[in-house]
Image (tube, helix red, strand yellow):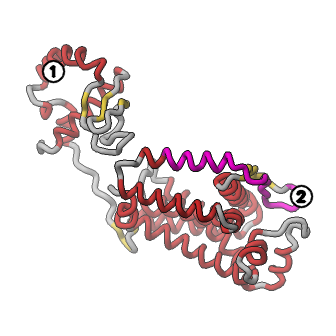
Amino acid sequence: MDACWLPKLKTMEASIEHRSRGDEVNCSHCGREQLLFGPRCVSCGKPLILSEPAPQAEAQAAASHSYEESYYGEYGSSPCCSPLAAALEQAPEEPEPEPVALGVDAYGLVSLAIGLAAAILSLLFFWPAWIFGHLSIAIHEFGHAAAGWLFGYFSIPAYDFIFGGGVTISSERIWLIVAVVYALFGYAAWRVREQPRLLGTLGVAVAAYTFLMLTSWHEALIIGIGHGAELVFGGIFLYRAIGNRTIVAAAERPVYAFLGFFLLIYNGWLAWRLAADASFRESYNQAKGELLAMDYTRLAVDYWHLSLRAVAIIFFCLTIGAFLAAWIVAVFRRRLVYPFIGE
């Protein structure tokens, strides 16, 4: 076995041992005590070099000799002779699926085709469109509520049983919530204090948040993030279908593809009809009986000072952009993400 496997083997065997005994290990960089579940420290993110916790050091040192004799006496004097090492040496590495077209493997293309066909069929018939449309409504209203909480507004999402769709009820701004958000930013900064690129990315996020919070732009963001959340979740689902990462069962990929395509087509079709059909724009403005203005209408009239048709065209382009972003991030993730957060 290659010598480079020895540190990994030691970590894996120690991980098994410590899990069974419930012991902890110390990070040699920051001193954080933690259960050994991975190769990096959960606090500082640096490679975890095993060192025993101080209270257990003497007991472990006393037991070390007898453990090595009982373990390596049966399998040899080197860790490379253990069953775990033999399994690592003999088990062939499973190769990554080769891309067939546009950086996507064959099963990924099949999953996308199945998901696209299922989404189109669902939207063509009333009951499937009505059932899965409630998923879109839930994501939409939770997007409003999450953005409201982020900027200090107590928000509760709900279904609208009078006019249909959904509605999010919000209070006046509560500055204590804003203080909690900044406290969370501070805690996150402390956790990544030794990772400069990630810390810099967090600093940009805090600056952007502060600018939005102190201007009326955050109100426009809260209104627009309803449809925006649907596009984000649609993009995430398609990313998982395309990227084949952290997939437990192969059947997940066509399901993710279906959900992603359904959300994007559902939104894109609404934006397209608003852009192309004047009578539909009129009915859209009356959707809540003139009691509550719809999201696109509020963005057009109160914030962006554009026509409803122009706002619809913008969101239609964002729908296409969500699909392209999902594909680009899935195929070029290492080049796009690591420059901001580090490897």
Q: Give the left or right position of residue 247, taking residue 31 as reference.
A: right
Residue 73 position, x and y percent, is 11, 20
**Residue 162 numbered tag:** 2
Number of numbered callouts drawn: 2
Q: Can residue 258 be seen in this view?
A: no
- The part of the image, by quadrant, that contains residue 285 is bottom right
Q: Which comes before the other along the chain, label 2 or label 1?
A: 1
Q: Residue at x 24, y 37 (%)?
A: 49
Q: Give, as a three-letter code, the residue at label 2.
A: Ile
**Residue 278 numbered tag:** none
Q: Is residue 130 above or below residue 31?
A: below
Residue 133 position, x and y percent, is 72, 61
**Label 2: element kind:** loop
Range of magenta residues: 161-187
For disc 1, the marked residue is 68
Residue 284 position, x and y percent, is 82, 74
